[in-house]
Image (spheres, rainbow, N blue to C red):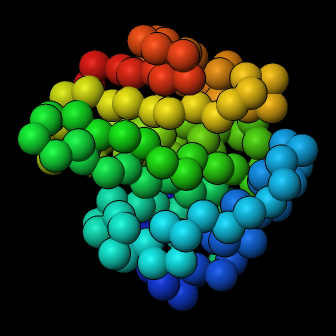
Amino acid sequence: MEIIPYTREYRDDMIFMVLEAKNALGKIPRLNDDLLDVEKNYPGRFWLAVDGGRVVGCVGFTPIEGADEAFLHRLFVKCSKKRRGIGSALLETAEKNMREAGIKLSRVHLGSPREQWFESYAFYPKHGYTEYAPRYMSKKL
């Protein structure tokens, strides 16, 4: 498995992986419009975990204008590949790139209801994130 910057050749496989991950969480799999044009929405700020030529995870971030902060987006790992360090590797990649861009605070907006997004609520605190408002966590980088 390797973490690579997003390239368009993986777009459809990435979208399928995200929809599959949402379905595995019991969510109605809906396509997020931002994933249709990753280059436009996350220029140079989106990564894929690829294993055997297939997308098994993804993450991106968007800087908050006028601040040294950014929001993480679309951290998903293929259901059959979870608990193998892929999510941690993706998060580390995004955080490293945030620091290099001068970002000092990483924020994440978690899904609701909490029971359906239980994995996110457990994952981020393990990586140093703390809740600062309902459905929001942050970490100083």
> Measured along the vertical axis of the image, is residue 72 above or below residue 38?
above
> Measured along the vertical axis of the image, is residue 117 above or below residue 33?
above
Please name whichever residue, 135 or 91, is drawn nearer the observer in this view of the structure.
135
> Percent x, y for residue 86?
62, 45
* Residue at 42% in and 12% down: 132
Please name whichever residue, 126 or 39, is drawn nearer the observer in this view of the structure.
39
> Measured along the vertical axis of the image, is residue 113 above or below residue 32?
above
Q: Which corner quadrant holds the N terminus?
A: bottom right
State left or right for residue 116 relative to residue 89.
Answer: right
> Percent x, y for residue 25?
84, 43
> Percent x, y for residue 96?
29, 41
* Residue at 29% in and 40% down: 70
> Percent x, y for residue 78?
76, 54
Q: Which corner quadrant holds the C terminus?
A: top left
Residue 116 found in image quarter: top right
The answer to whether residue 84 is visible is: yes
